[in-house]
Amino acid sequence: MKIVAFWLILSGASCTLFGGDLADAPVGIYAAFDEQPPINLASTLEKEIKALLAPLGFATEWRPLDAAGQEVWADLAIVHFRGPCELPNKSVDQVSSGALGWTSVADGEVQPFAFVDCGRIRAFVKRGLAAQAAWRREGLFQRAIARVLAHELYHVLARTTAHGSSGIGEAEITVRELLSDDFHFEGRPVRRLLLSSARALVR
Ligand SMILES: [Zn+2]
């Protein structure tokens, strides 16, 4: 089965299922931002998510949440970015608690709705970023946002609430990992994603 996103996506009825034959259809990622994102964030997110998910069998295409029309997807994720996704000129963040990202679950089933809290991520990595050269901070922050998103996309695409013991699929990610130059999926989440992308080919 292929998932087709209609206008209905806007009203919360996220998708309609029907049979199709486009076995190589990509995953559609529909994104909405609470606050105007910096102009280069979209390209960073696309590049980072592609680098993490393409080796595991997922091609991804991004659309604004209010995009019209009808497209065929192998799978679908609707991502809501909360809070400011850019670095402030001055230090203003208070310590922020709560999840950096989360995915909706209903009746035990993972739903295609993911949330990424840029404000919490910004507060979380603030001290780690301060230790970096100023010119690197924005890029590192945007990559951290992409990694939190990748974690939530793992839940959506693998249809699981389970976590791995290391890598992007682990339950708790540290500041060091979020800002590290080498952080990717490892262990069971890799196997779950490979299984899921293989299943998408025969749906
Ligand atoms: Zn998780």
Image (cartoon, rainbow, N blue to C red):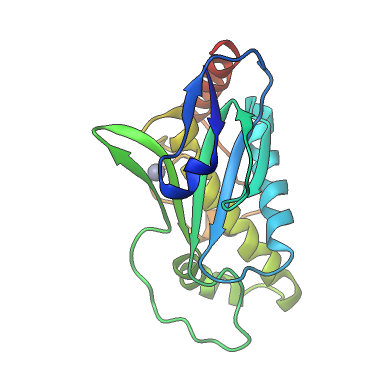
In the rendered image, the vertical position of residue 24 relative to residue 111, given as above or below: above
Q: Nearer the viewer, residue 59 or 144?
A: 59
- What percent of the width, then of the height, locates residue 156? 45, 36
Q: How many marks?
A: 0
Q: Nearer the viewer, residue 2 or 61?
A: 2
- What percent of the width, then of the height, locates residue 1? 52, 16
Q: Nearer the viewer, residue 61 or 52?
A: 61
In the rendered image, the vertical position of residue 110 relative to residue 63, given as above or below: above
Q: Residue furthest left?
A: 107
Q: Is residue 161 visible?
A: no
Quadrant in the picture for residue 180: bottom right
Residue lying at 64% horizontally and 39% vertically, measured from the top left:
52
Q: Is residue 149 left or right of residue 141?
A: left
Residue lying at 54% horizontally and 53% vertically, measured from the top left:
177
- What percent of the width, then of the height, locates residue 89? 63, 86
Q: Write down which quadrant ligand 1 falls in.
A: top left
Residue lying at 57% horizontally and 51% vertically, measured from the top left:
65
In the rendered image, the vertical position of residue 57 relative to residue 1, given as above or below: below
- What percent of the width, then of the height, locates residue 74? 59, 25
Q: Is residue 161 left or right of residue 57?
A: left
Q: Is residue 101 left or right of residue 28?
A: left
